[in-house]
Amino acid sequence: MEYDKNDLVSRVRSAVETALRAKQITMDESGRLMQRYEDGLNSYTYLSVNENEPVLPHNGYVSAKRHE
């Protein structure tokens, strides 16, 4: 999935600034929120295969039934 990182950050920053002006969050909270948000956007978002964990089927859905 593609997204415009700058647009997402701008939208969140605007919401954070609005919350700051309304005294709904502190300056410290706003800084932590933005840092964590940007860290999340920059992190690796794809699942990695671990031999101890099941892999999703190609359709991306997990069945409630166990296949053996």
Image (cartoon, rainbow, N blue to C red):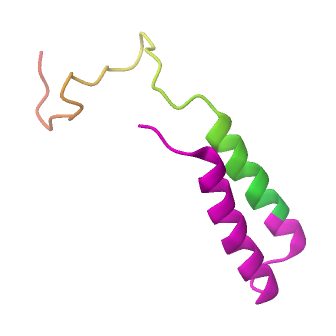
Extreme residue in the right direction: 28
Q: Is residue 65 above or below residue 67?
A: below
Q: Residue at x 47, y 27 (%)?
A: 46
Quadrant for the N terminus in the image: top left
Q: Nearer the viewer, residue 2 or 30?
A: 2
User: From the viewer's perspective, is residue 37 above or below residue 55?
Assistant: below
User: x and y percent of residue 7 in the render?
Assistant: 61, 54
Which percent across, then down, holds residue 24?
74, 85
The answer to whether 20 appears left or right of 11 in the picture is right
Query: At which x and y percent is residue 61?
Result: 20, 35
Residue at far bottom of view: 22
**Residue that appears at 43% across and 14% down:** 49
Q: In this view, does 13 lie to the left or right of 30?
A: left
State yes or no: residue 37 in magenta: no
4 vs 13, nearest the viewer: 4
Looking at the image, which residue is at 45% across and 14% down?
50
Q: Quadrant of the C terminus?
A: top left
Vertical placement of residue 30 versus 20, above or below: above
Question: Range of the magenta residues?
Answer: 1-30
